[in-house]
Image (cartoon, coloured by chain):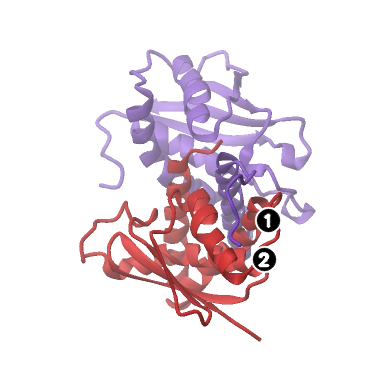
Amino acid sequence: MADDVLFEFLHMEIVSYVEQSAKKDEKDRLVAKLEQMGYRVGQSVVERLTKDTPRFSSELDIIKFICKDFWSSILKKQVDNLRTNHLGVYVLQDNKFRFLVQLSASKQYLEAAPKYLAFTCGLVRGALANVGLNCIVTAEVSNMPACKFQIMIQRS
Amino acid sequence: MSRQGGRSADPRKVSQELFTLTYGSLVSQLVKDYESDEEVNKQLDKMGYNIGIRLVEDFLARSGERRCNDFRETADIIAKSGFKMFLGITPTVANWSAAGDEFSLIFDNNPLTDFVELPEEHSQLNYSNILCGVIRGALETVQMDVNVRFVQDLLKGDNQTELKVKFIKRLEDAVPAGEE
């Protein structure tokens, strides 16, 4: 079993590596690149998580799975609050986000925070894509270490 | 109807796989970003080093290990305590040099490579090279300058995965990492 600390360090190194390499081209590639890395991991992880489970019965069922099982296996806790407009937009609030707790909980690093959420956005998008929901996932931080993930389901 | 608990996926196993897969996504990103395998190895080593210098503090705090009397003791602690704590594996310490300044860590299994096959065109890639960096960084923090390298790798068709750790010198009055 790999230790949790190791994963957190690895995540930090990935963020800092991508940030350094992004300086060469453009800054806005940073979040997209991290998101893309997360997407691929999310796709594989969700396959393992849902291997022996019954089929999901509804969209809400899938979102609940993300909030509980997915979140607790990956971010070591459940989502604290889930809101929806019942039109395909879900907002997941995590009051103590795993990758933000190591940062100072002041306004000082607020600008640096989004890059620590991008990988997770990708994880969630990848996971949802593989259980049949195409979506856009974005995240925002207003008050460290709490953050909100917004999932917008894309219906075609 | 909402689904009830009783999910069979073991959360610890998922953590392990998440780690392995995330590491994989990093390596594949590096392979895309750099032209040569050598550069990728170097970058992995560097990232490992950054992890190692911080990881060792976590290790010392949690394991309660004391100062080592000699390099042999250091080797045992790395293998039996360090690797056990962070990766859940215990590599074998072997192949001591006559001078007692170099040993090998032999891995029967390596969680980093669980889902990995190395394509032929990347024969120079040391997939798990991050481990070299971690050991180097960790030992540097406890004032030992070492050289760590892969000499055999299961991924490359060798019979076992072997890492060589060579003691170079003791660092006196080392400047704390990151404050040069």
Q: Is residue B47 above or below residue B89?
A: below
Chain that is coloured red in the picture: A
Callout 1: chain: A
What is the tally of numbered marks visible in this picture? 2
Q: Quadrant of residue B55?
A: top left
Residue B92 on image: x %, y %: 61, 21
Crowding near the residue tagged with mark 2, few <14, some 14–19, many ≥20 C-alpha atoms within 10 Å: some
Quarter the N terminus of chain B occupies: bottom right
Which disc is residue B23 wearing? none
Q: Secondary structure at mark 1?
A: helix
Amino acid type for the residue under numbered disc 2: Asn
Front position in the image: A21 or A120: A120
Q: Is residue B152 above or below residue A57?
A: above
Do the residues under discs 2 and 1 have CB atoms within 8 angstroms?
Answer: yes
Amino acid type for the residue under numbered disc 1: Glu
Q: Which residue lies at the image location 50% right of the left edge and 52% below the top edge?
A: A74
Q: Residue furthest front?
A: B1
Q: Quadrant of residue A133?
A: bottom right
Q: Which residue is mark 2?
A: A130
Residue B111 on image: x %, y %: 62, 39
Q: Is residue B103 visible?
A: yes
Q: Which residue is mark 1?
A: A47
Residue B90 on image: x %, y %: 58, 25
Q: Earlier in the sequence, mark 2 or mark 1?
A: 1
Chain that is coloured purple in the picture: B
User: How far apart, in angstroms, are the residues tagged by discs 2 and 1?
Assistant: 8 Å
Q: Is residue B13 left or right of residue B115?
A: left
Callout 2: chain: A
